[in-house]
Image (tube, coloured by chain):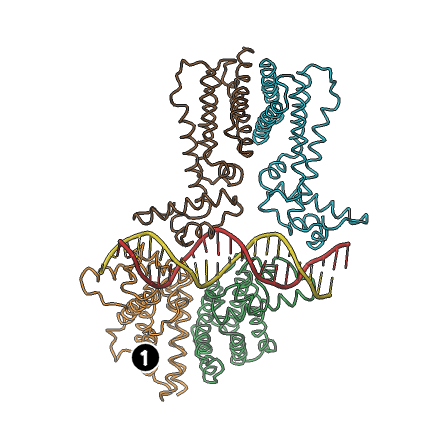
Chain colours: A cyan, B brown, C green, D orange, E red, F yellow
Amino acid sequence: MRKAPRQQRSRVTVDAIVEAATRVLARRGWARFTTNEIAAVAGVSVGSLYQYFPDKLAIAEAIRQRHLDEVLAALNGSDADVDASAPLSRRVERFVDGVIAAHSVDQALHRVLVDEVPLAARSTYPEFEAEYQRRYRALVVESGGPGDGADADIAARMLSSAVEGAVHAAARRGDLDAPAMRTELLRLVLAYLGDRQRTD
Amino acid sequence: MRKAPRQQRSRVTVDAIVEAATRVLARRGWARFTTNEIAAVAGVSVGSLYQYFPDKLAIAEAIRQRHLDEVLAALNGSDADVDASAPLSRRVERFVDGVIAAHSVDQALHRVLVDEVPLAARSTYPEFEAEYQRRYRALVVESGGPGDGADADIAARMLSSAVEGAVHAAARRGDLDAPAMRTELLRLVLAYLGDRQRTD
Amino acid sequence: MRKAPRQQRSRVTVDAIVEAATRVLARRGWARFTTNEIAAVAGVSVGSLYQYFPDKLAIAEAIRQRHLDEVLAALNGSDADVDASAPLSRRVERFVDGVIAAHSVDQALHRVLVDEVPLAARSTYPEFEAEYQRRYRALVVESGGPGDGADADIAARMLSSAVEGAVHAAARRGDLDAPAMRTELLRLVLAYLGDRQRTD
Amino acid sequence: MRKAPRQQRSRVTVDAIVEAATRVLARRGWARFTTNEIAAVAGVSVGSLYQYFPDKLAIAEAIRQRHLDEVLAALNGSDADVDASAPLSRRVERFVDGVIAAHSVDQALHRVLVDEVPLAARSTYPEFEAEYQRRYRALVVESGGPGDGADADIAARMLSSAVEGAVHAAARRGDLDAPAMRTELLRLVLAYLGDRQRTD
DNA sequence: GATGAATGAGTATTCATTCAT
DNA sequence: TATGAATGAATACTCATTCAT
């Protein structure tokens, strides 16, 4: 951000801009994400927009930041109260529900952010990914199986990418909240983790 | 295509255009896929480009067509000689190898084609997807487990989207040919299919 | 218009654009009525032009509107003070003077507007033509002769098209203000109207 | 023309080009009168077209030539057998019928040729106009009235431009062959000529 | 701080014309 | 002679960004 909003009024303006930009980005995609439309939707002049953001990408970055925060919150939501002593299946259920909830936040926006918007030099996306990966790794470690770090990393990557693929595809089809989808996803995760245990 | 190239000379031109366009699309993405750059890279004038393609999208469509053909060829390559009586693990191995080979074709291009290029009205992409899905379904059915059609469809979708996710992520990381990656992918698929069998 | 100019500055810009466009259209004709030249002549960037007009045709439409207003004003000018009780010859004189004045406004522009510029969907030209026709019809009716509506319509069309033809040709030759031209035009109109009276 | 067609074959080619070009010009107008379409419609390559015509305008000029010949022929057709001793009204009738016939030749083409196609440097159009004017002058002179040359010229111009205006307007409306239109046109011409006589 | 007018480089596409085969 | 492939200048329109008010 070019300039921190100091007054109450400015903070409202910045919020309006990000809010409007989010809608424009989700609806139109990155190619039609134009500053003039953002300003118009926000009920603000282009000039004001450039008062707070150095360029288009910076706005997208702000959107990404806000979205990833929400995604992490959704992920945490169903994860929070898991008893460490609960059986693995219970733990996995919570985890999968969290992932599904996280992807329900704003699917259109998510897709655009992931697939179209170029990564800014100073994006926080890698941090998010690391955090995301950490959770998968924790699940893998908890589930037992070949324990050394490298193996767990590999398994975490396999699992996370497979689950992401499944969830994204479901979101594209509009299937994200179908019970059958949840059942099969649970089966997939548990089968994989169980197999790793057995290899031990 | 607007016009069929008749002379030898023009066939060369059309090839040069598609070749150049493929490089531009893979490198720059759809947003920077400009006809002028394509022409420049192909060492040809814009006019020549429009002599054979009615618009930008038609070029992308030609690229997509060519790419999907190559992908299917790669998929078929390792699948061809599988003995029907071979054990499931053998069958899955072949299948996974085919998928990995298919995604090794031109990963950057593949991502852009799948995520960014808008589907032209006459695209053959849906056909390709159906064919792709069919193979997964065949694998699911062969592996036994709850047999009725709807269940198999759901499982095929889960499996294909998970495998796609895993393979795409690996491609992004440059891991596609790491043996560990193959091992884990096999484990994932076999574990899922095995679990389904057991539920029977 | 795409956007209403709010500030003084922008009103000046819009005027400059329409002014310049009028000159370009009159000089070059519709085929060479290019947005870049308009902007250059107006001393403005193309962008400014598109800030206020959605496309080329809209500029032409604005020109047409302005021109037709001026034409009607000229037509009214000499028509205004005609006494209803005046003899027909006096009435016709005024009318013809009005028509000549109307065509003196900007002949080159007029020709291009009438012959070359395609009619926009929302053009007001038909309204203008109707108004124009109405005046001829009034003249025909006043002059007596076969009175029913259809006959008057036909006569009005004949008269208006003949007068228009004569005036346009004179304008093309640069003869529009030659006294002989006015004399003969008067003769033509009076002779025709007189002949219709006698047929009664 | 760039080159005179010597062989039989070439003459056929040139005819096919002019024929095709005429259709294209009438249908599409000058703005969409493209050499490639002409060649395609003529079933000939663009190269062949440029073998015989130095540029686009030359083709249009050839079309104009042919069209004006046809117009003169139509004009002559009904004029030919007029007895010099016939009453004026008979003579005018023949004349007007000739003019109407002349404008019935190919109205769409005529309009485009007159309004849109720029005059080539070496166009024969002025010759045609002179010839056309001469006939009107003859009619004026025959009809009596103020006799000296200048007066007759002025009257001929007034008459020709008025008649042209009336006929063109009728053609645009599709009224060219309506009997009422012919009646009124006759009335106009006779009234004007009669009035001139009386002024004598 | 806010506004919105102005800028102009950038993009897709067309079409007259040339020239190697 | 005929072909049709190749050329590239020209043209309408968009949109990120700046800056005077």
**Residue D177, can we see it?**
no
- The foreground one among C42 and A117 is A117
**Disc 1 residue type (three-letter):** Arg
Judge whether A30 appears above or below A127 on screen: below
Q: Residue at x 68, y 54 (%)?
A: A46
**Residue B92, can we see it?**
yes
Q: Quarter holding the C terminus of chain A?
A: top right
Asked whether, in this view, residue B132 is left or right of residue D51, the answer is right
Judge whether E1 appears above or below B86 on screen: below
Helix, strand or loop at disc 1?
helix
Judge whether D19 appears above or below A30 on screen: below
Give the x, y percent position of residue D190: 37, 76
Q: How crowded is mark 1: few (under 14 residues within 10 Å), some or many (20 or more)?
A: some
Furthest residue to the right?
A7
Give the x, y percent position of residue B72: 42, 30
Asked whether, in this view, residue D74 is left or right of residue A33, the answer is left
Q: Which residue is drawn at 40% across and 53% down?
A: B44
Give the x, y percent position of residue A30: 59, 44
Furthest residue to the left?
D8
Q: Which residue is drawn at 27% across and 59% down?
A: D48
Q: Name the residue under label 1.
A: D134
Asked whether, in this view, residue D1 is left or right of residue D162, the answer is left
- The foreground one among D145 and B151 is B151
Q: Output the chain of dot 1.
A: D
The answer to which quarter of the image holds residue B101 is top left
